[in-house]
Image (cartoon, rainbow, N blue to C red):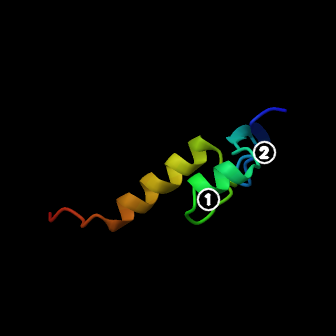
Amino acid sequence: MSNKIQKHCIICGRAFEVKVLAESPLVEDFFGGPPEKSTSFCPICEARIRKEAGDTQKDPKPI
């Protein structure tokens, strides 16, 4: 069985692969933290969203 799942981006519709941890008690004990969020955006759209969010947080330059 592959450790990757193929999903589609909810913005652009591109197919991308998501890594999945194996379902076993050893993995759950070793990684005891909160579960990871499921990704719904491809890496390209995610980078674009992060850039746009960062640009809106910057102060505009004085004229």
Disc nearest the viewer among 2 and 1:
1
Inspect the image, locate mark 1, and give the three-letter code of the amino acid beneath it.
Answer: Glu
Q: CA distance from mark 2 to mark 1?
A: 16 Å
Foreground of the two, 21 or 8:
21
Q: Point out the image quarter for the N terminus.
A: top right
- Picture quadrant where residue 33 is located: bottom right
> Which percent across, then down, holds residue 59?
24, 67
In this view, 6 is above or below 63:
above
Q: Which residue is mark 2?
A: 7
* Residue 10 picture quarter: bottom right
- Judging depth in this view, the residue of 43 and 55 nearest the camera is 43
Mark 2: few, some, or many residues within 10 Å (few <14, many ≥20)?
some
Q: Is residue 31 above or below residue 5?
A: below
Q: Provide the secondary structure element on which disc 2 rests.
A: strand
Q: What's the mark number on residue 57?
A: none
The numbered mark at residue 36 is 1
Counting from the top left corner in percent of width and height, residue 50 is at 46, 55
Residue under the point 45% across and 57% down:
52
Specify whether 33 is left or right of 19: left
- What residue lies at 36% left-to-right and 58% top-to-bottom? 55
